[in-house]
Image (cartoon, rainbow, N blue to C red):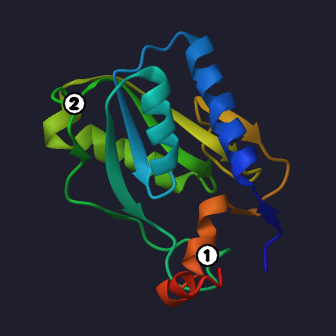
Amino acid sequence: MAEKLIISWDEYNKTVEELAVKIHSSGFKVNLLIGIMRGGAPIIDVLSRIFKIKCAYLAVESYTGKSIEDNQGDIVFSRELSSTAKNLGGNILLCDDLSDTGVTLTESIKWLKKYDPIKNNINEIKTAVLWKKKHSTFEPDFCAKKLDTNPWIVQPFEKYEEIRIEDIKKGTT
């Protein structure tokens, strides 16, 4: 079993805010936020509110099943990017919760550059993550926390992966 880094809601929110400050301070003018689902969803929700810009979602799956902390499977992409933005493109900020091995971010950039509705409208793609693990081969453009180890990061919303609806209805969560 991998070492675990357990993140509280307060720490999570402060880390997203720290990331927002780094992005803003860089001067990079973001036209579209793209979140790698599911980890990127809460991040781009907050960043889109802070920066007042539209976002899009790219569903990517690489970790599945039970007891998979140390195993990354094949990467599967959604067929389409989901967004209400009228203009997809410009300066894109691709966000995920973390850079673990770096494979998901690397492959997501390749996917975006080949995706017909957007590929000819991209000025630049930069990346942002909350955490970068030590063994990651990918260097994100913006990172809130660079870790000296490779823990399994337990984010505050992950408790719902272990909770059943029956437990919520009974009030036993």
Q: Residue at the location (24% across, 48% down)? A: 81
* x, y percent for residue 109: 39, 42
Separation (CA) of disc 2 from disc 1:
33 Å
Residue carrying label 2? 88
The N terminus appears in which quarter of the rendering? bottom right
- Expressed as whole percent of the image width and height from the top left, the position of residue 127 reads 51, 34
Residue type at mark 1: give it: Asn
Give the label on residue 71, or none.
1
When asked about the image quadrant of residue 25, the answer is top right
Q: Is residue 17 above or below residue 169?
A: above
1 up-or-down from 150: above or below: below
Q: Is residue 152 left or right of residue 86?
A: right
Residue at 61% across, 67% down? 158
Crowd around label 1: few <14 · some 14–19 · many ≥20 (10 Å): few
Earlier residue among tags 2 and 1: 1
Three-letter code for the amino acid on which mark 2 is drawn:
Leu
| Residue 126 shows in this picture | no
Q: Is residue 71 visible?
A: yes
